[in-house]
Amino acid sequence: MDNQAKVIDIIRRVTGNAVEIDADESLFDSGILDSFALTDVIGELEKEFSIKVPDADLNPRKFNSISRIVSYVEAHL
């Protein structure tokens, strides 16, 4: 499974929602994620990819879309 598929799976598991949007579309504007679910998604990203997301990076803009999340994860592997 590639990183994008893993990210989509994490979002689907955390939110219970189907993730059927373009990779560059806003997860917040589409209603898939909110600030509460974001913290759960970040926790799952940390477990899945063995990374640590520092508090300074807890900015919704950094995790606004699937492509941004994948880019963030890949930069911190």
Image (tube, helix red, strand yellow):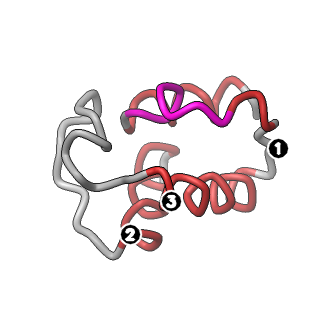
Residue 33 location in percent, x, y? 36, 53
Figure quadrant of residue 57: top right
Looking at the image, tell me whether mark 2 or mark 3 is earlier in sequence order.
2
Looking at the image, tell me whether mark 2 or mark 1 is earlier in sequence order.
2
Q: In the picture provided, is 39 more to the left or to the right than 32?
A: right
Q: Secondary structure at mark 1?
A: loop
Figure quadrant of residue 27: top left
- Packing grade of label 2 (10 A; few <14, some 14-19, many >=20) is some
Residue interval drawn in magenta: 58-64
- Distance in Å between CA atoms under marks 2 and 3: 10 Å
Which residue is label 3 attached to? 36
- Amino acid on which disc 2 is placed: Thr
Contact? badges 2 and 3 (CB < 8 Å): no
Is residue 34 on the magenta stretch? Answer: no
- Amino acid on which disc 1 is placed: Lys
Residue nearer the viewer, 49 or 56: 56
- Distance in Å between CA atoms under marks 1 and 3: 18 Å
Residue nearer the viewer, 20 or 27: 27
- Packing grade of label 1 (10 A; few <14, some 14-19, many >=20) is some
Q: Residue at x 52, y 44 (%)?
A: 3
Q: In the picture, which quadrant includes the C terminus?
A: top right
Which residue is label 1 attached to? 52
Looking at the image, tell me whether mark 1 or mark 3 is earlier in sequence order.
3
- Distance in Å between CA atoms under marks 2 and 1: 21 Å
Q: Secondary structure at mark 2?
A: helix
Which residue is label 2 attached to? 15
